[in-house]
Amino acid sequence: MKFIHYSLVIVCLLTLCTSCVDEEQFDNSPQGNIEALWKIIDEHYCFLDYKHDAYGLDWDEVHQKYKAQVNSSMTSKQLFEVLTNMLAELRDGHVNLTAAHDYGRYWSWHEDYPANFSDSLLRRYMGIDYMIASGIDYRIFDDNIGYIRYESFNDGIGEGNLDEVFMHMMLCQGLIVDIRSNSGGMLTNAEKLAARFCQERTLVGYMQHKTGPGHNDFSAREPVYLEPSGNIRWNKPVVLLTNRHVYSAANEFTAYMQAMPLVTIVGDHTGGGAGMPFNSSLPNGWNVRFSAVPMYDAQGQSIEFGIAPDHLVQQTDSDFAKGRDTIIEFARELLQ
């Protein structure tokens, strides 16, 4: 996959975004800051039309609603609350407002759903003799099913680490890759792991970039391909475990794996987060992060609101009481 090419595109786009936002100056006042924030999102956020179609978002209406809540006598904390509430209308975990006193965020993409993951259950499955290769924990279960746990794509993993993991799993009849509650990180780490399950150059999605201030000003969709790893690859059945806390780079990893013929996705719908985030600033110095580059799956469908599993499986209370992870056990049965 041409990540160097994408990085150059992103740098150029970031320069474009910054220059566009700076063309109009706003006063460092409550009114000036809300107008600056609204305009940044209006011209550079990449999902306004999509979310209008998905749930009726009207960004002009949002403007009028929150502008009426701003006045010259309000405190900075009151202004922060209003601006954060305005951004929450986008329903996007990649949209954040950062000030010295707080971090505005939208986390309902996972907080309003069952966790479908338990650290205490996982410890029972892993025991104390599991192996660790940089960012990956792994072991072989008694039924000869391999298990890999990657909890954050911010945790680096080298090609040598991956070679050791897959060599250790070589005689297993199947493999479980558990990324539940992995909320993202470095896309390069997601690509590196996914390439171990790729047997030939594979179309895994599409991307676009903004070309102007209009809500629908985008470039043509550019195909995204995954190249097979030149190192040890896995060519047996795989079950990928997901839940609502799978987001951003982990959501993209799920899209990559979905395109692999030997992979089955089990668990809950992922949380989404299909826009590459950029940053800008308000007149008062607060930083705003927002989605600016939309990503799609191999079928050309937006994955901003997540990816459905092949098998929807929820953790049950009865299994939890017995020390059983319902989702892992379902995966093991599939691989038998």
Image (cartoon, rainbow, N blue to C red):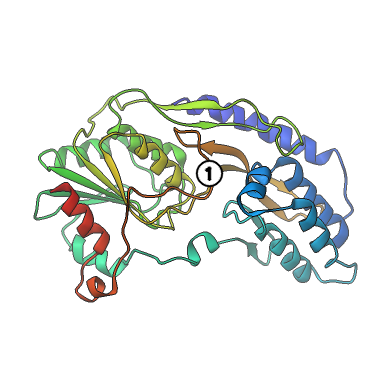
* Quadrant of the frame with the N terminus: top left
Which quadrant would residue 192 be assigned to in this image? Answer: top left
Residue at the (50%, 26%) spot, across then down: 223
Give the mark count. 1
Residue at the (79%, 47%) spot, across then down: 39
Asked if residue 29 can be seen in this view, the reply is no
Q: Position of residue 209 (x, y in %)?
A: 63, 32
Q: Position of residue 297 (x, y in %)?
A: 46, 36
Vertical order, 334 against 320 (above or below) = above
The secondary structure type at the circle numbered 1 is loop
Vertical order, 37 against 19 (above or below) = below
Residue at the (65%, 41%) spot, across then down: 46
Which quadrant would residue 220 be assigned to in this image? Answer: top right
Asked if residue 281 can be seen in this view, the reply is yes
Circle 1: residue type? Ala
Q: Position of residue 238 (x, y in %)?
A: 24, 42
Instruction: Give whichever of 49, 1 is nearer the camera.
Output: 49
Q: Position of residue 47 (x, y in %)?
A: 64, 44
Vertical order, 204 against 85 (above or below) = above
Instruction: Give whichever of 18, 93 is nearer the camera.
Output: 93
* Mark 1 neighbour density, 10 Å: few (under 14) some (14–19) many (20 or more): many
Vertical order, 320 against 200 (above or below) = below
Side of 206 relative to 90 (left or right): left
Which residue does the numbered mark 1 point to in the structure image? 274
Side of 24 relative to 321 (left or right): right
